[in-house]
């Protein structure tokens, strides 16, 4: 993104935002509530259109017209509410919007057998313990639902996955399971952007961190050369204040 701005009436959500996501890495995006993180993800994923600025994806202009347009180019998003259909089975959620069919044109019938047989294969690429694929998603634990949503995002030739608070409200064991899935996506070469308020998590799984405050990008820090206290000071503005006083 270069020079991207977005306003909603008098409210400036993003102000001249420029950042890069290194290919094949997990990048964290942190900031206080209202910093502009969710707006930024919605612009990258085609939900919103920027007022100004430009976006490039894999070296080509990428002002996506819609989320479907973004998905076709390889950008998948896992929102905090997961966007799973609770009354549908795991296999049906995996193929939601991408259903396999058989039969002549205009008389397509869902190919349930193929979708069932391929679901375990697809999920096992990313999940060590695949949940029961015939179970309705609403019967799964929060962690299981989250890993299904993340694995679904990584299953369809994705190149970039955006995640908004992927472990919010999960317990320690479930958080660990979700983080393992995210790291497996990285091992398979995907580029990942993770929004998280959990700085311990950010330092566990990311390679670098972008910090936002009040709609602006404050800076980038490589994980190996930073620490949580520095990130907190950037989020709160303490770092800028200290620099001004010096």
Image (cartoon, rainbow, N blue to C red):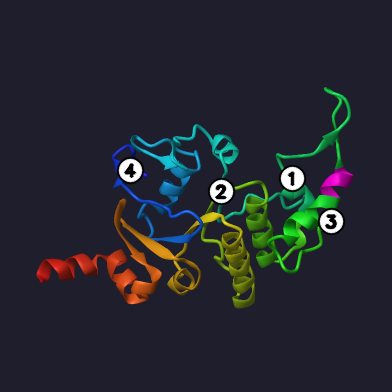
Q: CA distance from mark 4 to mark 1?
A: 34 Å
Residue on which disc 2 sits: 159
Task: Please tell me whether mark 3 or mark 4 is closer to you in this view.
Answer: 4
- Asked if one can make out residue 65 in the rendered structure from this viewpoint, the answer is yes
Eye-nearest disc, 4 or 2: 2
- Answer few, some or many: residues within 10 Å of disc 2's Cα (few below 14, many 20 plus, some between 14 and 19): many
> In the shown orientation, is residue 131 left or right of residue 29?
right
What number of labels is visible? 4
Badge nearest the viewer, 1 or 2: 2
Find the distance from the CA under tag 1 to the CA under tag 3. Answer: 13 Å
Q: Whole-Å distance between the Cαs marked 3 and 2?
A: 28 Å
Q: Which residues are magenta?
A: 112-116
Residue tagged 1: 95
C-alpha span from label 3 to label 4: 45 Å
Packing grade of label 3 (10 A; few <14, some 14-19, many >=20) is few
**Is residue 160 placed above or below 10 in the rendered structure?**
below
- Residue at x 61% of width, y 69% of height: 180
Left or right placement of residue 126 versus residue 89 in this view: left
In whole angstroms, how far apart are the C-alphas of marks 1 and 2? 18 Å
Q: Which residue is mark 4?
A: 2
Determine crowd level at label 1: few under 14, some 14-19, many 20+ residues with C-alpha closer than 10 A: some
User: Quick one: SS at disc 3?
Assistant: loop
Residue 134, numbered label: 3
Q: Earlier in the sequence, mark 3 or mark 4?
A: 4
* Badge 1 vs badge 3, beta-carbon distance below 8 Å: no
């Amino acid at each position: 993104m270069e020079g991207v701005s977005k306003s909603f009436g008098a409210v400036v959500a993003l102000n001249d935002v420029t950042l890069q996501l290194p290919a094949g890495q997990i990048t964290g995006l942190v900031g206080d509530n209202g910093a502009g993180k969710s707006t930024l993800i919605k612009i990258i994923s085609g939900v919103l259109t920027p007022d100004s600025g430009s976006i490039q994806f894999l070296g080509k202009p990428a002002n996506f017209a819609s989320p479907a347009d973004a998905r076709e180019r390889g950008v998948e998003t896992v929102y905090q509410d997961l966007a799973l259909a609770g009354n549908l089975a795991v296999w049906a959620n995996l193929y939601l919007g991408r259903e396999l069919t058989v039969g002549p044109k205009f008389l397509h019938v869902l190919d349930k057998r193929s979708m069932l047989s391929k679901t375990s294969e697809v999920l096992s690429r990313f999940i060590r313990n695949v949940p029961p694929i015939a179970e309705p998603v609403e019967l799964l634990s929060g962690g299981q639902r989250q890993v299904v949503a993340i694995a679904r995002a990584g299953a369809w030739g994705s190149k970039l996955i955006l995640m908004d608070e992927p472990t919010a409200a999960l317990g320690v064991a479930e958080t660990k399971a979700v983080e393992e899935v995210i790291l497996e996506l990285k091992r398979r070469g995907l580029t990942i952007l993770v929004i998280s308020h959990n700085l311990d998590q950010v330092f566990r799984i990311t390679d670098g961190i972008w910090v936002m405050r009040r709609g602006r990008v404050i800076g980038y820090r490589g994980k190996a050369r930073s620490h949580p206290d520095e990130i907190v000071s950037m989020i709160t503005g303490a770092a800028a204040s200290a620099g001004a006083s010096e």
